[in-house]
Image (spheres, rainbow, N blue to C red):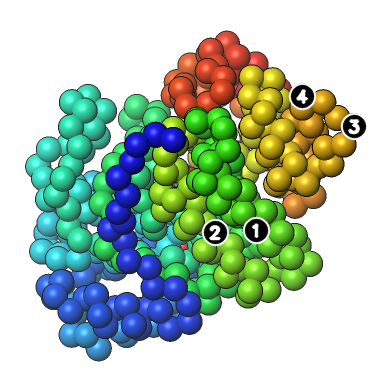
Amino acid sequence: MKDFMYSYPTKVYFGDGAAKKALQKELAGTGKTIMLAYGGGSVKKNGVYDEISRYLKEAGKDIVDFSGIMPNPTYKKVQEGAALAREKGVSFILALGGGSVIDCCKIIAAQAVTEKDIWKMEFEDHVYPTEYLPMGAVVTASGTGAEMNNGAVITNEDTNQKAGVLGAHANFAILDVGYTMSLPAKQVISGAFDTLSHSMETYLGSPRDINLSDEIGEAVMRNVIRNIRVLLKDMNNKEARTELMWASAMAENGILKIGKVTDFQAHQIEHQLGAYTDCNHGQGLAVIHPVLYRHMYKDGVKQFARLAEKVWEVPAEGKTQEELAEAGVQALADFVKEIGLPSTFTEMGLTDQSVLQKVADTCNLTAGCCKKFTREEILQILVECWE
Ligand code: NZQ
Ligand code: ZN
């Protein structure tokens, strides 16, 4: 196990009525002007915006609306939010949404307090922000776990990069499954697959011998698989949605990563696919994972075999370790089909095959996994993802 220091800056308020409790307690000393940031309007339709604004008004706060944060948020949107925060003298940012809104706010929080350009600072000067406007997150779509970390995935349209930018941790996160019940079924499933992906990409990092973090990871993955299956029969099953909401946070609150170097090669590929196509994150991952793992399992047979047995419940009897590992990858591919996610980029609706070369040329290559891929191999994987 790698040495570590663990502490966590984000308080979690989980369950029915969490927002009222959290906002009463946490906003007491935050100043008067709150930026209420949200996406394309789902929070206005489902009543979440009205409920949260009411709590803010009851607490005597002034609200600055910042709307229109798009899925796969852009760096331009970050700049717009930061300019508004400065202009209005915002003292606290409350993100109301899924991963996209929360991520955008993490970087607005950093950009609003500095004249320097955050993108240039992080990617050219390798200097990371240390000061932020404080923020909180009200989760309306779970899966990314964005409420539990300070990494924000932002698309820079000028450079064609969708990249992880470091920003603020939310001081607190509000997880009330009631706020997510209006989410379309497709997004519920792709979000849950994202959680599974985070857990797998953590599990398949190093060290490769079984350890406590991985055993907890196995439990999270089994939980996600089981609860997605419950939802296939009853999408409104609140208990299953609640479990998935906590699993999503668990996969990104650092616990599964303790003592580990994570892999995240599938994510790196998907992010660049997103930069060029604006595709749905969970759907992209669903296509990439099985293909990537077919190219990877032979270099990590022990880990893949354990994943097959402990998570996919593939019987080990009569199989070599390599056969078991391969059967686990097949179980993942079958699961993607079972839950109605796409298995190819064409099923996702992509039409321009020329993006594959661009993605292969520009995605980050990670070092934490059992196999370090070359760009030629990534291109081959992407081609196999096509159809
Ligand atoms: O914009 P609105 O109208 O709110 O609609 C959104 C959006 O269209 C809708 N939605 C959200 N809550 C809803 C709802 N619709 C009805 N009822 C509700 N309660 O859902 C759509 C998708 O929202 P989005 O926030 O984009 O989805 P998700 O949570 O999957 O976030 C995806 C983004 O997070 C990044 C992804 O790359 C992508 O940009 N990720 C962030 C991570 C992190 N910070 O740790 C890790 C992930 O690996 C991921 O990369
Ligand atoms: Zn993800």
Callouts 4 and 1 close, C-beta under 8 Å: no
Side of 362 relative to 387 (left or right): left
Badge number at residue 223: 1
Q: Residues within 10 Å of mark 2 (few under 14, many from 20)?
A: many
Query: 352 or 283: which is nearer to us?
Result: 283
Up the image or down, 92 lies above or below 276; here it is below
What amino acid is labelled 4 in the image?
Glu
- Residue under label 2, please give it: 247
Side of 50 relative to 29 (left or right): right
- Residue under label 4, please give it: 322
Who comes first in sequence, dot 4 or dot 1?
A: 1
Who comes first in sequence, dot 3 or dot 1?
A: 1
Who comes first in sequence, dot 2 or dot 1?
A: 1
- Mark 3 or mark 1, which is nearer to you? 3
Up the image or down, 285 lies above or below 179; here it is above
Callouts 2 and 4 close, C-beta under 8 Å: no
